[in-house]
């Protein structure tokens, strides 16, 4: 990418804001050094990393790189033989511990985040160096006694020697014979030796070694002769302790050096993950969306797949038929400049591609032309650096080989360059880069002038300005025609009327304007594509207070043709606004119709659910009565077999007839309830399973037995246990090798935990998940409410470690959003 244009578009400021979202210095370095790529594979992989990181932050906010450090300098020191200090070793341990945790988490979620899992697979899972550091050094940076048997013995002897010495000194300062010579009855240290403070006047009365004296000279710090040997023994043990600690640190450093490449690789992989999470956090801060990426491969247009894993996206546009060359298009929908206040910035929408590849933007000064150019350029650079862009879903961007921007006044006194000269230098540099070969002959150019190119984006502010207007306008038209013939995408800001006319009459070139409110003398920053803008210099001058006679004189000097053109532009603008108002009204009416349709559909669904509930309740009631009658029949049959007298036999037979009479109406009721089961079920029939509160599809039928597919689970049950809901599924249900026999136990597809504390909720949830798994439910809905978020966090932390949970996510806008958690159970 062109370095000067990257600076002109202020892309380094984007990187600075991105770096603020990183966790540790290695990730920050990657963020600050991030550059756009023109390789489609690299761009799509980088966007995939951002998409997956955003999904991971959404469903598992506990994933963190906290505790990681850039320990590559320490590893290099270990490699060359320098002894690492305890804090360096702790940084290495913490980094490897975090590496292990992140690796296990992401590999467990590899199905949802395959690209991040691929990066995580490079992290260290086991490390002898980290284990040894944990064993030998505590969190305070101290080598512990258990680091080695020798150190443990030395410190035990040290404690004994220190106790003996302190006991001897305490007796001395506590005695009346020595106490009268002391400045204070305390024990202190000088030069690593334990001493007592003696008044200088009694120097000859206390036999010992003087190690120091006070600043005033009134106190001498003397080591009594009686404790010299004890001090010597203590000092020898302290030196032995230092040597053993040094030996242990050298050994731990050697362990680090033995794993130097793996540790360095782990740090760099953590930095890659840190960058991915930073891009996701920055996307959240900007309310950014993933752009569709288009390339021209083999003469055919290709588009990146639509976003998945919880990131908002729309399907990629349909591809053209084979053999038809259609260069990639640029389509921005409500795009916002990423460096401006996202709450107040005015979004822009524009499209370049098949119809037009050059946009000529006109309008008054400070109207937003430069902001438009920078917005387009910055969003292109951001997308090719793997960043989501602040725009609405459906935004499409090509992968440019390079982006060139000539924006701003670069007049240089030192280099004797005027504004015109500096702009021309930039334009000449751009043209040399994008046109290395002669243009194709006219017979091979397309009607829109794409010329088979499209690999570059050119942004030019005030093209041809700074010189004679006639020459400058002619030069600007020649440059645009040069770009048009080669199919280069370009956005140009200008005040020249001739360029407006050129754009209006030339295929492949389109006008656009930025609006200005003449009443408030303030720009609206609204971009209108398809109409040229007016400079409004005379109107602005008049509003600002310039004398009317001067304004009238200036207007008289403008040619009639120019004034007529301005009037036509005004009429066109009014017609365009009227058409847009009609379109808005039409869209509002359509939206009202769609709203009413959704409301009717919801009402119908509620009626269907109520009907199913009534049928289900009636069926359960009938089945309970049938079971009761069957039990009485069995009892009667037993009494008949045991009856010995004819009178008793007749009595029991009469009782049996009465019970049979009671059974018949119940069976009739059962058949009337299960009307949908009277006709034989066939393969592909959609059915409702009341005991599971689920819908399914019949995949096999054998008389009174049917096999039903519910999600990824197959169940075999009696035909009377299901009811046909009508129609066949549009797409076949994916087959599964898992078969579960229904137990008849009814487990609802959702559970309500609102109002419970965290402990009661997890206990209730544990039993519910077990029942749901046994019942063969593939998905369940956990309702915990929003509230303060405490119960939600407790539920999701519990789900994260539950063995029956394959995945979970927050509900979407139709499921309850953050008030519910949608849980996917593992397959049986």
Image: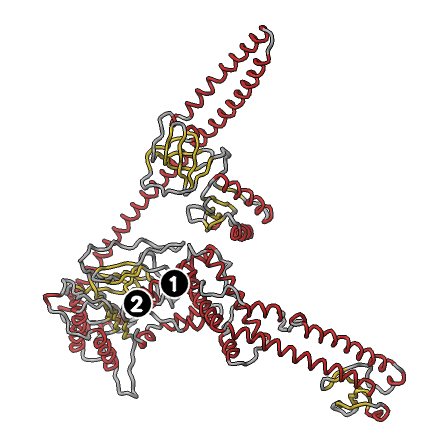
Q: Earlier along the polypeptide chain: callout 1 or callout 2? A: 2
The colour scheme used here is: secondary structure
Closer to us: 618 or 70 = 70
Up/down of 812 relative to 402, above or below:
above
Query: Is residue 482 shown left or right of residue 373?
Result: left
Q: Distance between the residues labelled 1 and 2?
A: 35 Å
Give neighbour class at mark 2: few <14, some 14-19, many 20+ (Cα, 10 Å). few
Up/down of 609 relative to 213, above or below:
above
Residue 547, position as x, y percentages in the image: 25, 73
Up/down of 672 relative to 279, above or below:
above
Numbered badge on residue 344: 1
Residue 444, position as x, y percentages in the image: 12, 65
Closer to us: 637 or 344 = 637
Query: Is residue 758 visible to us here?
Result: yes
Residue 69, position as x, y percentages in the image: 51, 71
Residue 592, position as x, y percentages in the image: 32, 44
Query: Is residue 536 visible to us here?
Result: no
The image quarter in which residue 497 lies: bottom left
Residue annotated with mark 2: 39
Which residue: 70% across, 80% down? 238
Up/down of 241 relative to 732, above or below:
below
Do labels 1 and 2 touch, CB within 8 Å? no
Which residue: 90% across, 83% down? 176
Secondary structure under badge 1?
loop
Closer to us: 691 or 51 = 691
């Amino acid at each position: 990418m062109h370095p000067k244009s990257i600076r002109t578009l202020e892309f380094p400021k984007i990187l600075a804001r991105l770096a603020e979202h990183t966790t540790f210095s290695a990730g920050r370095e990657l963020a600050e050094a991030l550059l756009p790529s023109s390789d489609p594979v690299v761009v799509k992989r980088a966007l995939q990393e951002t998409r997956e990181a955003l999904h991971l932050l959404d469903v598992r906010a506990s994933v963190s790189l906290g505790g990681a450090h850039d320990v590559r300098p320490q590893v290099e020191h270990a490699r060359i033989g320098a002894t690492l200090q305890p804090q360096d070793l702790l940084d290495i341990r913490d980094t490897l511990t975090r590496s292990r945790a992140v690796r296990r988490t992401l590999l467990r979620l590899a199905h949802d985040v395959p690209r991040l899992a691929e990066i995580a697979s490079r992290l260290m899972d086991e490390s002898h160096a980290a284990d040894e550091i944990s064993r030998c050094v505590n969190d305070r940076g101290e080598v512990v006694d258990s680091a080695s048997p020798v150190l443990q013995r030395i410190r035990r002897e040290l404690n004994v020697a220190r106790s003996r010495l302190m006991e001897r000194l305490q007796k001395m300062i506590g005695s009346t014979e020595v106490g009268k010579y002391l400045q204070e009855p305390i024990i202190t240290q000088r030069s690593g030796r334990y001493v007592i403070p003696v008044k200088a006047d009694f120097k000859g009365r206390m036999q010992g070694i003087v190690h120091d004296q006070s600043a005033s000279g009134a106190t001498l710090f003397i080591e009594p002769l009686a404790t010299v040997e004890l001090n010597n023994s203590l000092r020898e043990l302290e030196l032995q302790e230092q040597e053993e600690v040094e030996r242990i640190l050298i050994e731990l450093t050697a362990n680090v050096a033995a794993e130097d490449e793996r540790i360095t690789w782990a740090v760099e992989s953590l930095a890659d993950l840190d960058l991915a999470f930073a891009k996701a956090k920055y996307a959240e801060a900007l309310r950014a969306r993933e752009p569709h990426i288009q390339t021209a491969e083999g003469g055919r247009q290709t588009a990146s797949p639509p976003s998945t894993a919880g990131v908002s996206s729309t399907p990629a546009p349909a591809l053209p038929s084979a053999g038809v060359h259609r260069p990639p298009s640029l389509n921005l929908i409500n795009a916002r400049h990423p460096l401006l206040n996202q709450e107040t910035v005015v979004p822009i929408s524009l499209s370049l591609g098949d119809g037009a590849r050059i946009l000529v933007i006109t309008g008054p000064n400070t109207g937003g032309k430069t902001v438009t150019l920078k917005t387009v350029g910055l969003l292109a650079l951001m997308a090719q650096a793997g960043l989501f862009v602040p725009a609405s879903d459906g935004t499409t961007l090509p992968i440019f080989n390079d982006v060139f921007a000539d924006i701003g006044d670069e007049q240089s006194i030192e280099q004797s360059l005027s504004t015109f000269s500096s702009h021309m230098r930039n334009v000449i540099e751009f043209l040399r880069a994008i046109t290395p070969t002669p243009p194709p002959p006219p017979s091979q150019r397309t009607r829109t002038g794409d010329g088979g190119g499209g690999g570059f984006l050119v942004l030019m502010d005030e093209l041809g300005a700074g010189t004679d207007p006639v020459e400058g306008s002619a030069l600007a038209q020649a440059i645009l025609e040069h770009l048009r013939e080669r199919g280069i995408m370009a956005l140009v800001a200008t005040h020249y009327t001739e360029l407006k006319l050129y754009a209006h009459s030339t295929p492949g070139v389109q006008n656009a304007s930025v609006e200005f409110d003449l009443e408030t003398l303030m720009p609206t920053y609204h971009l209108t594509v398809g109409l040229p803008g007016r400079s409004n210099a005379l109107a602005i001058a008049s509003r600002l207070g310039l004398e009317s006679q001067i304004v009238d004189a200036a207007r008289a000097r403008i040619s009639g043709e120019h004034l007529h053109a301005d009037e036509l532009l005004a009429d066109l603008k009014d017609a365009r606004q009227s058409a847009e108002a009609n379109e808005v009204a039409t869209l509002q009416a359509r939206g009202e119709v769609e709203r009413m349709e959704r409301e009717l559909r919801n009402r119908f669904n509620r009626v269907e659910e109520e009907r199913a509930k009534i049928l289900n309740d009636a069926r359960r009631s009938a089945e309970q009565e049938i079971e009761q009658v069957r039990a009485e029949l069995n009892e009667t049959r037993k009494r008949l077999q045991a009856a010995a007298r004819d009178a008793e036999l007749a009595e029991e037979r009469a009782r049996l007839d009465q019970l049979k009479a009671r059974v018949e109406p119940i069976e009739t009721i059962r058949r009337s309830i299960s009307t949908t089961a009277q006709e034989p079920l066939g393969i592909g029939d959609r059915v409702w399973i009341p005991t599971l509160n689920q819908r399914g599809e019949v995949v096999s039928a054998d008389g009174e037995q049917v096999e039903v597919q519910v999600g990824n689970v197959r169940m075999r049950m009696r035909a009377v246990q299901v009811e046909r809901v009508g129609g066949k599924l549009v797409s076949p249900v994916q087959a599964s090798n898992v078969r579960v026999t229904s137990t008849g136990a009814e487990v609802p597809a959702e559970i309500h935990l609102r109002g419970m504390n965290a402990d009661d909720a997890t206990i209730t949830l544990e039993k519910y998940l077990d029942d749901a798994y046994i019942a063969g439910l593939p998905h369940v809905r956990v309702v915990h409410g929003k509230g303060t978020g405490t119960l939600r966090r407790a539920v999701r932390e519990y789900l994260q470690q539950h063995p029956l949970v394959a995945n979970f996510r927050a509900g979407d806008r139709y499921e309850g959003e953050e008030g519910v958690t949608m849980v996917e159970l593992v397959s049986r």
